Structure formats: C-alpha cells, structure tokens
Amino acid sequence: MIAGALAMKVLRFEQPTPVPFDLLRFQIEEMAGVAINYDSSAGGEAREQTVTVALDNVTLGEIVAEAARQVGLKPIIDTDGVRLVLEALPTNESAPIGDDVIVGP
C-alpha cells in the first residue's frame, strides 16, 4: 500500500521558490497519504534546509527522494510509512526500489 501510494505519477511537480525541506515533506505526505517521518539519525538541520524541485513525469516517491537528497537524507519505506535517514547508509541495510527510494528491513 505504501509503495503503491508513492508510485502515483505526477506530470509536473514544481517548487521553484526555496522552502524548508520539512514544509515540502509535509506537502508530499499529504498528497501521498503516507506518513513521512524522520529517523533519529536525521537530526534537525535537514528539516530547515531549503530545497527547490522541478520535475516532470515522476512519481511521488521520486519527488521525496530528490528533495531528501538535497538535504542529505534518503527515504526508506517501512511498515509505518517512509522513514528519512542520513544518506550515508550501509549498503547491506536496504535494497533499492527504482533509482532512489529504498525499502528497509
């Protein structure tokens, strides 16, 4: 169900004005109907860093992944929704889905 919600296609997603990552995270969370939470490793700095996004023909998961990448985070799909973790994740901890979104244990 979570992966299906994140697979929803969007013809164009644009946030040209820099906004705090946390605001964009909340917007995508509302669009997908999936909880997007921070892992304890993510820290508070990423939440306030600003992001801009302009993507065509992407999924909601790809939008999350791109915005998260800009602040040094990586989305992990787990049983509760999406968990945002620091980008430097051991390769044996998760498996890739598509290009950027990965599934956790």
Image (tube, rainbow, N blue to C red):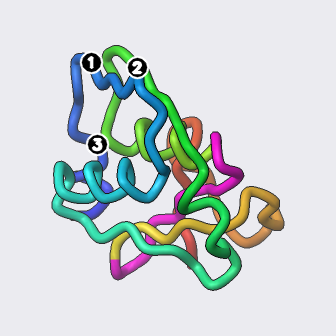
**Helix, strand or loop at disc 1?**
strand
Nearer the viewer's eye, disc 3 or disc 1?
1
Q: Residue lying furthest bottom in this view?
A: 40
Q: Give the range drawn in magenta.
A: 70-80
Q: Earlier in the sequence, mark 3 or mark 1?
A: 3
Quadrant hosting residue 104: bottom right
Q: Which of marks 3 and 2 is nearer the N terminus?
A: 3
Label 3 close to label 2 by CB (< 8 Å)? no
Q: Is residue 77 within the magenta segment?
A: yes
Q: Is residue 78 within the magenta segment?
A: yes
Question: Which residue corresponds to mark 3?
Answer: 7
Q: Earlier in the sequence, mark 2 or mark 1?
A: 1
Q: How far apart are marks 3 and 1 (CA)?
A: 14 Å
Q: Distance between the residues labelled 2 and 1?
A: 6 Å
Residue 62 image offset from top left, x and y in percent: 44, 37
Quadrant hosting residue 77: bottom left
Residue 9 image offset from top left, x and y in percent: 23, 30
Q: Quadrant of the N terminus?
A: bottom left
Near-viewer residue (11 or 94):
11
What residue sits 37% from the left and 80% below the top?
79
Question: Which residue corresponds to mark 1?
Answer: 12
What residue sits 34% from the left and 81% below the top?
80
Nearer the viewer's eye, disc 3 or disc 2?
2
Amino acid on which the number 2 mark rests in the picture = Leu
What residue sits 51% from the left and 41% below the top?
67
Label 2 close to label 1 by CB (< 8 Å)? yes
